Image (tube, coloured by chain):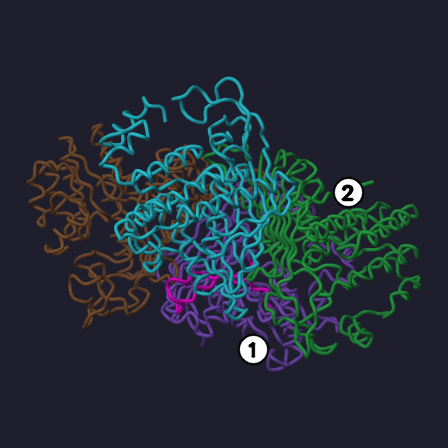
Chain colours: A cyan, B green, C purple, D brown
């Protein structure tokens, strides 16, 4: 992230040119599309400027560090769209084939009326109190902790799959380790502790109950302290006709229970989501030859540039990102007020 | 439950005698121990009378339909204990070997400081709106719905395993199907609908966040609407040194992650809890030859009569049952007041 | 097994009377049914004498230690059946509900034409070379090792499920640990080593390929050296319309793949075999409350006494036991002759 | 594969140039490395010519359609190596991180003495008799069927992981569907049937028992008729100190049983093989963010060009490919002679 690293990276990765000031990127005529991958506190400024400079924008999630920032970004995106400038927020997990299939099954009515959504995003990379500080643990830069970094994904995914939105939440946030060693000097390897300590100013974990627009009960959990769970995005949905279960640690599989099946032969089906007819899969390997984490990013870029080429608005939009931001904000406000029930404003 | 059925059942099951009025049971000199298996609204009266009659008592869970009832029962149990009359509440799942092993691992410090508890009790037997009414769906008789019937188990189990108590909750309750067909005439098969409908006056599902005495975050869910989950008691605990995962649908297995293991060879271990050294197992089959649901009841009775024979107080006590009742009560009060954070009184 | 232990066991278990000489049992008028649970070298003598004394007989598996013994037993059973004296061989695993469901699905044509059968019975109780000798490791008493003790079960189960018989085998047998410490003195705990060593004269493991009557390819494995597998009876069957998978370490579950399902929603279904409509289950617990190892024995006894009461021949018969014995014998002959293909005689 | 397709593919994929005659490739000075991906009947001619032209060669597996061809290729590779020309056979699955970890654990002695190897490669893409002919079903082109196409992989993988070689086999081959519809006209989509039928001249499935150099028993199965299994490469290894289990359908996971662990806490560990210290993983994503099928190919190319750059011989070599060919050949000879035990010649 520091300027001296840039030419070295360019050389190693074979990039033709680099810039270390984002403003220069926006001035360049040979740049059509900007991918905003910086810490959250800079998203709004860069993305809005890029849109105003007529660049299409892909912005990492969460969209921003606050609702007002996200509102400004969504407004800028709406303005830019009138001129054919496109924007997208990077909820890449939507493009895991098993997630796509989950959404299809719900849309096809195979789950009936949704009654329960339980979603967890479990990691453990700072479960050890000796793990050093990083920008992700500073509220100024990251906005929030596990909540925004990974909780945002399960909020987006469950809304995406069900086609419904959260209407309210009751939340608890917790910071288990409030002080951590500072990292070793800039430029050294990440994850290595240096001298002194810093304060963790974000949540280590967030848990909340919720309601969906259709009346379903939601239970959410996001943590970086679930020892032994590395990247467990786990989603279960129970409806009146069927149920779904997914875990990213087994990302090529979707479990589906068909309630229309006679009881004696009913059971959760382990669908290996690698058939040619599954979302995105037809472009890849034969059945059973699984995809990995990076394919979500590839699908995202393909969908984005296809939308740009076709003059269509890609999804998820900045408005979608704003809506997730409102959920995150409601979670923080609820947690700050003793888990008080906190409504989430709808689209306006 | 109706008197005419009794002699027939006695004949079929080989019982020497039966009574259809519980008061007669208490008058009999040849009865030392009373097992209260009636609906919750009758627990307090029967159990207290039995204790006062000098009978040892095993009472089904939840202990009562209200905190005052449970308090009266716990007080009666304390009085009776002074005369060597013993009492126990029937949280049988404590005596599944995998649960016993989980508790041992926590007690041995293998999990370190507990940070997360997530617990679900998922069933689906009334997911179908056509399933008929039963006493379990009437507040007068059952006290509550999924909350008391199955939620009580996961409250007790997580407290039992961690050796900690819940200190507060924020809860939502939901009744998805508010009116159901009445069952066919008494004496006919259960589960068959008759004419007319009745109102469901209890919760179909309960979800709540919680805190434990040691600071851990808890997430709880109890429902009879998780289509495809038949009796899924799922408990996961993450600590600073290790993690546990259990699902009653695979009841002879406990998953344990040992955080002291080097990262490259660490992973959740699927422990088949059938070794001679595992709790209760030494009295049963060779390794790998699993136990079933009923063994929990057998273990419970053995522990109870052993305690009686040894003049010791068995666990879980009526005081333990009262404490769980206070959690259930706090859940109901929180849910009635928009998920407001509700403290749970400690022992006094 | 030694006489002095008998009264003590009777006292502990509440038996009214005991005998230490099996001949006395046959002379008693108050004994109608004899369960032969002794080592294999005594099965033929006891069972034949019992049948000739007019006692119904349940004989443990494998039926005998040799084909001639099994032939004599099957002949005795056929003679006795003419007088209404019934006999059964104790392949208890047939009566695990998931196995019953597997057989039903095949019989209903849900698998179509069977193409592959792969079956393993994996244990590890003598993987440690320090585990002491026992009668099960002596050819004189046990007949064979893993082959007869556990391999017999998977031969019987796969034939039972498919409704087909093995027509030939090509086999390897291996004894990994050829000498073991003698056990401590008789009467002491089993599994404890004493002084001196003894020769292991049976196989530690058996592997064989096979053909079924319908043309399917079979692959079988039985071993007591699969470290970490405690009682893994694993059976997979692939047909032209569907597939099945079972593992006794998760005994209440059957996995079924329905090939008629569209590819995009097809997957192995994890059927929790605890529904009222599943074999034997209606007499036990509610859905999801699993059975254990012992229920197979209970079902076996119920089926046997029901057959006796109804004047019907129970299954599996001694003729079935003889047929399995012929498979075991073919395996041993093949292994003794460099895995030579060895036909298995059919019924005659 | 037909010439007209070539420029179109080049255009679509962004290739600078193409050739439709492999001889031209060998004549080009700007080609240093040739990847032979043609059907097996052409491997020997192309690879030998390429090596003689001084090109490094990566050849798809199995190395050839016959042992003599493979011998000629291995000899050509040995000659070329003297001039610094490198060759490698494409057993890509060796480079799945979980397989690399498995090999490390065996090499580190964590499994002790290997006693059992059971390996299956299960697919189902021609389970349907209506699936059309393809070159993979013709002996002239493919050499063999499931045996060489997928069985070769599990032979290589088990030898690679254990560091041992197969010494003999006893095998059965089967062709379940002997005649299939011809595919639609060349150039049309694969998998679509046209008019007429063709004879399947290769095996649909292969099963064999085996011995390893260290005395372990092997059981192998390769089939394209395991309905519901899409690309299930399943390998289990039991040793005197530990056991391993792998299934490519969950490719980022290795199960490891550590027999040194006390029995009460021992169990198969589900190791998510995505830690920085795992083979190849340090170059990819954070822990828990899995890899896919294609990474094996990337790793293969990196290892190959690194070896070329360092002047080292990459593995697996053509000699390794020849050894696998000898196993395949022994399997075919055994199957042709009633499963007769067939020795596999060692290195010479």
Queried whether the magenta region covers residue A235, the answer comes back as no
**Label 2: how many Cα within 10 Å (few below 14, some 14–19, many 20+):** few
Q: Is residue D135 left or right of residue B310?
A: left
Can you say whether B208 is above or below C91 in the image? above
x then y, percent, for residue B121:
63, 54
Question: Which residue ends up furthest to the top in the rendered image?
Answer: A195
Label 2 to label 1: alpha-carbon separation: 72 Å
- Label 2 belongs to which residue? B345
Q: Quadrant of the N terminus of chain A?
A: top left
Choose between D345 and D143: the one closer to the eye. Answer: D143
Quadrant housing residue C265: bottom left
The numbered mark 2 sits on a residue in which chain?
Answer: B
Look at the numbered discs 2 and 1 and tell me whether their residues touch, using CB distance below 8 Å: no
Secondary structure of the residue carrying tag 1 is: helix
What range of the chain is rendered magenta? C251-275
**Mark 2, secondary structure of its residue:** loop
Residue at x 48%, y 19% (from the top left corner):
A194
Q: Give the residue displayed 28% in from the left and 52% down from the top.
A: A311
At which x and y percent is residue B203?
Answer: 68, 60
Which residue is the site of mark 1?
C78
Q: Chain of mark 1?
A: C
Residue B113: give x, y in percent of width and height. 63, 34
The answer to whether residue B17 is seen in the rendering is no
- Left or right: where does residue A226 sit relative to residue B146? left
In magenta stretch: residue C265: yes
The disc at residue D203 is none
In the displayed structure, A74 sits above or below A199; it is below
Q: Quadrant of residue C38?
A: bottom right
Q: Is residue A223 left or right of residue B38?
A: left
User: Are both tags, 2 and 1, on one chain?
Assistant: no
Residue drawn where x is 71% and y is 77% of the image: B188
């Amino acid at each position: 992230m520091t300027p001296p690293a840039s030419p070295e990276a360019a050389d190693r990765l074979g990039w033709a040119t680099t810039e270390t000031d984002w403003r220069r990127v926006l001035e360049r005529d040979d740049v059509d599309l900007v991918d905003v991958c910086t810490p959250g506190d800079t998203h709004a400024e860069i993305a809005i400027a890029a849109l105003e400079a007529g660049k299409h924008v892909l912005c990492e999630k969460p969209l921003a560090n606050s609702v007002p920032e996200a509102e400004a970004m969504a407004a800028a995106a709406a303005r830019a769209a009138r001129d054919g400038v496109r924007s997208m927020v990077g909820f890449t997990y939507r493009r895991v084939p098993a997630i796509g299939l989950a959404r299809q099954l719900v849309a096809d009515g195979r789950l009936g009326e949704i009654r329960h959504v339980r979603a967890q995003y479990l990691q453990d990379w700072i479960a050890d109190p000796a793990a050093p500080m990083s920008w992700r643990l500073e509220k100024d830069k990251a906005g929030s902790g596990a909540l925004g970094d990974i909780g945002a994904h399960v909020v987006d995914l469950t809304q995406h799959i069900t086609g419904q939105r959260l209407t309210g939440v009751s939340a608890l946030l917790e910071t288990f380790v409030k002080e951590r060693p500072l990292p070793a000097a800039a430029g050294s390897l990440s994850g290595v502790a240096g001298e002194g300590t810093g304060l963790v100013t974000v949540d280590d974990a967030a848990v909340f109950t919720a309601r969906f627009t259709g009346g379903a009960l939601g239970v959410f959990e996001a943590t970086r302290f679930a020892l032994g769970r590395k990247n467990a995005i786990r989603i279960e949905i129970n409806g009146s006709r069927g149920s779904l279960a997914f875990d990213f640690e087994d990302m090529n599989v979707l479990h589906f229970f068909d309630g229309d099946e006679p009881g004696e032969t009913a059971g959760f089906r382990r669908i290996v989501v690698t058939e040619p007819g599954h979302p995105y899969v037809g472009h890849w390997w034969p059945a059973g030859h699984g995809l990995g984490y990076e394919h979500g990013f590839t699908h995202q870029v393909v969908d984005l540039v296809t939308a740009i080429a076709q003059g269509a608005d890609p999804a998820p939009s900045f408005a979608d990102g704003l809506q997730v931001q409102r959920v995150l904000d409601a979670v923080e406000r609820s947690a700050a007020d003793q888990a008080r029930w906190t409504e989430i404003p709808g689209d306006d």
